Amino acid sequence: MGRKWVKLTDDKQSVVRIAADLVDEDMNQLCAYQKDTDPANHDKKTLDMLKKRKLVTVTTAKSYKVTKGTDFAPERVKLETNLTADMLRSGAWKDTKFKKANLNAAGQVPSGGHLHPLLKVRT
């Protein structure tokens, strides 16, 4: 009745068809959205109307691709932290992988010893 396809008779007991041919715009819009689900390719006003009527829900799907990196190994290898004298003697340091070290990092400031007993009163 909202689309003026049918009307009630005067006695309100039956329905009479008014329109000669019925064109369902909502079905056409839903079929068009079903063929191409990208919201950017559709009219924002019609898409909002379909969302409001809960005929369409727009969701985003995220996917990740995981591949083997350059340092991939089937077994984990423990990296060495220090170069020892035994490694230098045996020559094992050539084949051993070491952890990366930041040699430019500033160390902790050493504490300055004990406070004088009279200075403890001030703090």
Image (cartoon, rainbow, N blue to C red):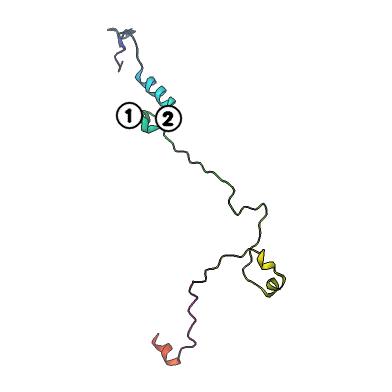
Quadrant in which residue 78 is drawn: bottom right
Q: Earlier in the sequence, mark 1 or mark 2?
A: 2
User: From what the image shows, is residue 12 above or below residue 102?
Assistant: above
Name which residue lies at 31% across and 12% down. 5
Rate crowding at label 2 as few (under 14), some (14 to 19) or many (20 or more) other CA atoms within 10 Å. Answer: some
Q: Of all residues shown, which one is farthest toward the left? A: 10
Q: Which residue is mark 1?
A: 43
Q: Amino acid at mark 2?
A: Thr
Image: 73 above or below 119 = above
Q: Are marks 1 and 2 in contact (CB under 8 Å)?
A: no
- Label of residue 105 in the image: none
Badge 1: residue crowd in 10 Å (few <14, some 14–19, many ≥20): few
Q: Quadrant of residue 10?
A: top left
Rendered location of residue 70, percent (x, y): 59, 52
* Image location of residue 95, percent across then percent down: 67, 63
Q: Nearer the viewer, residue 67 or 45?
A: 67
Q: Which residue is pictured at 68% across the width and 72% down the height?
A: 88
Quadrant of residue 42 in the image?
A: top left
The three-letter code of the residue at mark 1 reads Asp
Residue furthest right as drawn: 90
Residue 51: x %, y % from top left: 37, 31
Q: Which residues are magenta?
A: 103-115
Looking at the image, residue 90 sits to the left or right of residue 27; the answer is: right
Q: Residue at x 39, y 29 (%)?
A: 54
What secondary structure is the stretch in magenta mostly built from? loop
- Residue 29 to residue 74: above or below: above
Estimate the spatial distance between the alpha carbons at disc 1 and disc 2, rounded to whole Å: 12 Å
Q: Is residue 106 left or right of residue 68?
A: left
Task: Determine which residue is flagged by label 2.
Answer: 37
